[in-house]
């Protein structure tokens, strides 16, 4: 076994931190001077980097595109509503939720931090980079910018049959900065990547990547709309002048016309032309371009990639078909197809940096989330069916405890019979009649 991998596996959290000098030395011995590392993004030589950079996604898309921001905000507001709990596991089936002191680090991840802020940072990083990294340092958590984290593998994926994660290298400012890197073991760093990148073993992919062209088109449409207002909210005009007009006169005419008629503050002013000038409309207005449909289709595709129904975000195409029933169905779709899988995934990612109790798993508690209250009616109907099943089982002679356990787990093998049966199941004549009351001597029966 290689020196680096052996030292990474044998080092415990109570030992002195593995220095960067030792890391580079052992890494040189392991790969003969050709280390392989992975960060969140595309491929550049032997290093994978974020496509268009993490900063580019944040500044040019997340902060500048209203549709992307609104869609991401809808995801964030729902995602941050959940709370973390432990869930008992009995025979491979989930049981009751409970909490203990080990969950305090998720409830107060950093000074003045909350569970909601932790989940908000996770959602933002996953949206912009596809990856979320957080390390545990004692009684607090520390979030790491995804483009400053490298995943150190035991071997290059394209050169070895097996390649595992040996650790995470965090360099403040990025790999090109002069800051001292810090190495974390897999048990010290939680890595959440809900959408796996097909071109990488352990890296995630942003949901924005497949809709980059849609985002660019939406931005171009917004700029087009802005230019329409900047140029007087009128269709494009073509003005032709007489051939006798000199170049200087032509330039002066253009400057004066633009000064008096260009811009929204000059909209609808009467255009006066001199002799020989001819004006023709060569463009179309926003209504003729069917601008709403053109831009609305792109907005819907962006929302679809995010897993958010357009009606939830308030996009035009979603509102056109909006009714109360449609909104309820959209909420259920987002809760079942996006929110719950996301919570389940982030729980699995955070569990390794916690002290997990025996026969339990980290889980989410969504019972107090108002967005999901539409499901309470269905839950009540399911509970009613379970109660009827329990009643039937008890009347059939099974112990109440085993019936409840079997219904809760869905395993009928847990049923235990008392040996007693109802009167309808007894053979004829098998029962003894109750003794008749004795008559009192000396008195006639009434």
Image (cartoon, grey):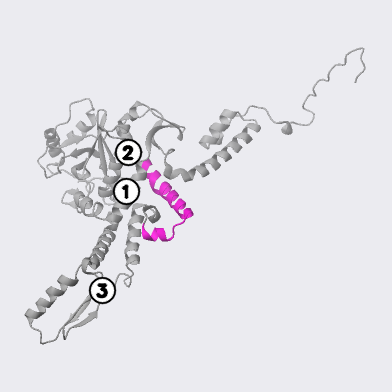
Q: Find the magenta span and give its range.
A: 315-343
**In this rendering, would 308 be left or right of 9?**
right
- In the rendered picture of this protein, how many numbered marks are placed on residues? 3
Residue 67 location, quadrant: bottom left
In the rendered image, which residue does mark 3 sit on?
Answer: 235
Q: Secondary structure at mark 1?
A: helix
- Percent across and percent down for residue 3 are 17, 33
Quarter holding the C terminus is top right
In the rendered image, which residue does mark 1 sit on?
Answer: 73
Task: Check the image and report above or below for 14 versus 194.
Answer: above
Q: Are marks 1 and 2 in contact (CB under 8 Å)?
A: no
Q: Main secondary structure of the magenta part?
A: helix
- Percent across and percent down for residue 240 are 17, 82
Nearer-the-camera pick, 380 or 246: 246
User: Which label is found at residue 116?
Assistant: 2
Q: Residue at x 47, y 53 (%)?
A: 324
- The first of marks 3 and 2 along the sequence is 2
Q: CA distance from mark 1 to mark 3?
A: 36 Å
**In this rendering, would 38 be left or right of 179?**
right
Residue 184 location, quadrant: top left
Q: Is residue 235 visible?
A: yes
Circle 1 Cα neighbour tier, 10 Å, few/some/many (<14 / 14–19 / ≥20): some
- Percent across and percent down for residue 249 are 9, 80
Task: Check the image and report above or below for 257 versus 353.
Answer: below
Indicate which label's residue lies in the foreground, 1 or 3.
3
Q: Is residue 230 visible?
A: no
Q: CA distance from mark 3 to mark 2?
A: 48 Å
Task: Check the image and report above or below for 208 versus 274.
Answer: above
Q: Within the magenta stretch, is there residue 197? A: no
Q: CA distance from mark 1 to mark 2?
A: 13 Å
């Amino acid at each position: 076994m290689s020196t680096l991998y052996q030292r990474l596996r044998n080092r415990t959290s109570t030992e002195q931190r593995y220095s960067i000098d030792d890391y580079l030395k052992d890494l040189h011995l392991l790969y003969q001077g050709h280390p392989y590392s992975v960060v969140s993004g595309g491929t550049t030589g032997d290093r994978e980097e974020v496509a268009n950079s993490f900063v580019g996604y944040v500044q040019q898309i997340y902060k500048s595109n209203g549709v992307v921001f609104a869609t991401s905000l809808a995801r964030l507001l729902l995602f941050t509503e959940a709370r973390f709990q432990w869930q008992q596991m009995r025979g491979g089936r989930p049981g009751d939720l409970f909490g203990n002191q080990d969950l305090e680090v998720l409830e107060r991840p950093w000074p003045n931090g909350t569970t909601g802020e932790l989940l908000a940072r996770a959602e933002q990083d996953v949206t912009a980079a596809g990856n979320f990294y957080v390390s545990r340092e004692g009684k607090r958590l520390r979030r790491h910018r995804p483009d400053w984290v490298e995943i150190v593998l035991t071997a290059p994926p394209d050169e070895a049959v097996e390649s595992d994660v040996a650790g995470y290298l965090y360099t403040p400012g990025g790999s090109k900065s002069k800051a001292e890197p810090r190495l974390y073991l897999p048990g010290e760093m939680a890595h959440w990547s809900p959408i796996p990148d097909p071109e990488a073993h352990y890296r995630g992919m942003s949901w924005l990547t497949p809709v980059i062209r849609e985002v660019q088109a939406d931005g171009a449409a917004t700029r087009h709309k802005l230019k329409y207002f900047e140029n007087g909210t009128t269709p494009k005009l073509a003005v032709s002048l007489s051939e006798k007009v000199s170049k200087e006169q032509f330039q002066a005419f253009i400057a004066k016309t633009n000064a008096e008629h260009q811009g929204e503050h000059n909209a609808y002013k009467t255009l006066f032309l001199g002799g020989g000038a001819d004006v023709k409309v060569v463009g179309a207005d926003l209504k003729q371009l069917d601008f709403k449909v053109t831009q609305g289709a792109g907005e819907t595709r962006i929302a679809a990639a995010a897993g958010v129904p357009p009606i939830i975000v308030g996009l035009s195409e979603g509102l056109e078909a909006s009714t109360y029933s449609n909104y309820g169905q959209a909420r259920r779709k987002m809760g079942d197809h996006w929110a719950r899988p996301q919570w389940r995934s982030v729980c699995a990612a955070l569990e390794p940096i916690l002290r997990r109790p025996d026969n339990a798993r980290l889980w989410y508690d969504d019972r107090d989330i108002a967005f999901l209250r539409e499901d309470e009616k269905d839950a009540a109907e399911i509970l009613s069916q379970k109660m009827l099943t329990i009643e039937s089982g008890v009347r059939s002679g099974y112990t109440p405890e085993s019936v409840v356990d079997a219904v809760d787990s869905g395993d009928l093998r847990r049923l235990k019979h008392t040996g007693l049966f109802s009167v309808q199941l007894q053979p004829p004549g098998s029962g003894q009649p109750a003794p008749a009351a004795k008559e009192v001597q000396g008195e006639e029966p009434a």
